[in-house]
Amino acid sequence: MSEAAEIPADVVAVKDYWPYAQARLEASAWAYFSGGAEQERGLEKNLQAFADYEIIPRVLQDMTQGSTQIDLNGRAYAYPIFLAPVAWQRWAHPEGELATAQAAAAMGAPFMVSMQSTSSIEEIRAAAPQAELWLQWYWHHDRTATEALWQRCVQAEVTAIVLTLDAPVQGLRPREQRAGQHRPAHLHTPHLDGFNGAAQHFAAAGQSPVFGAGLMHSAPRWHEVQAFIEACPLPVWLKGVMHPDDARLAVEVGAAGVMVSNHGARQLDAFPAPVRCLPAVVSAVQGRLPVVLDGGVRSGSDVFIALALGAQAVAIGRPYVMGLAVGGAAGVAHVLHLLRTELELTMVLSGCAQIEQISCERLA
């Protein structure tokens, strides 16, 4: 791990990172990493949805074999907290994705690298040889560039591809617009270099009329997603699945798993919180593929609630980026440590020694 930064002494919970991160980030970066779509009601809904649940305690349960370990698609993980894809991480900290990957390796958490990463997958692998890396993917019709990046992922020992489905256009984000939507000139997104026009598409997204936006017109349909999955040399997860019918289609096209996500409430305020959609998606897939919940997780009890509602794991985005902005790799590792510790405490107080014991019967 890179040289440890000093974490402020009063940062004792994930939410404590927010004011320190705001103080360290320039206004446009803060707007990008903290903001959401439209009036940002979706951000609040993502958080409030967890508060609608309560956890019923059990006492005097046997905790001698306590463990947070999970098994997912044949792989064992020490705890069910993953790092979701977040773009432009060198905008949050000079070491960006390299620091995040080092923290992920140290803490044993999979890191989903954004396709709009400001470091290449090869640089990230070199910085963190032991990290489990997944690569988040935005659809592009350029098959030659697609296959070339697939092979780079294979060479870099990437574990899975995470195909994002919920961003055929970019949501309207007034906070970013007011801040100028500035991106530092010295940063770029190397994974887009081989895709004709991709960087320009992302730069212009949200600035064109919706029905004229290039991202929407190049977005795939289900048969194309199936062809992508069948041709890809790595397992493909589908991110942005909120409707049970889409979950069933994900099973049909051969997805390795689905992520229930509303894109961090960055697309549409009227979308429901992912945790509200989670039970229906879990019911629709009927155990045929794993489900990961992405959105609104800020505590170990949030993790517990998501697992009780049927998720196999959760993915966090803003929490670890705030940690990154404040403390680099040490900040990311600290966020993971806080959440895992809180999850263990929640399990003890609810009488669940193993992840498998967490069920909807534990909720009120």
Image: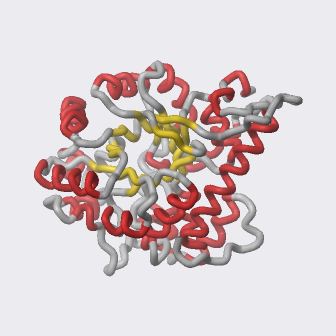
Residue lying farthest left? 144
Residue for point 72% across, 27% down: 363
Is residue 316 visible from the viewing direction of this image? yes
Which residue, as the protein is rendered here, is positioned at the far right? Answer: 60
Of residue 133 and residue 89, the one placed in the foreground of this image is 133
Number of disc labels: 0
Where residue 61 appears, as percent x and y from the top left, is: 83, 29
Is residue 355 shown above or below 169?
A: above
State the residue at coordinates (56%, 78%): 3
Q: Position of residue 122 (x, y in %)?
A: 31, 65
Report the residue at 29% width, 60% height from top. Answer: 207
Q: Position of residue 305 (x, y in %)?
A: 66, 35
Image x and y of residue 22, in percent: 59, 72
Q: Identify the image quadrant of residue 166.
A: top left
Quadrant in the picture for the C terminus: top right
Q: Is residue 137 above or below residue 187?
A: above
Relative to 205, 23 lies left or right: right
Residue at point 39% right, 27% down? 247
Left or right position of 46 against 139: right
**Can residue 46 be seen?**
no
Q: How is the image coloured?
A: secondary structure
141 horizontally vs 210: left or right: left
Q: Residue furthest bottom?
A: 186
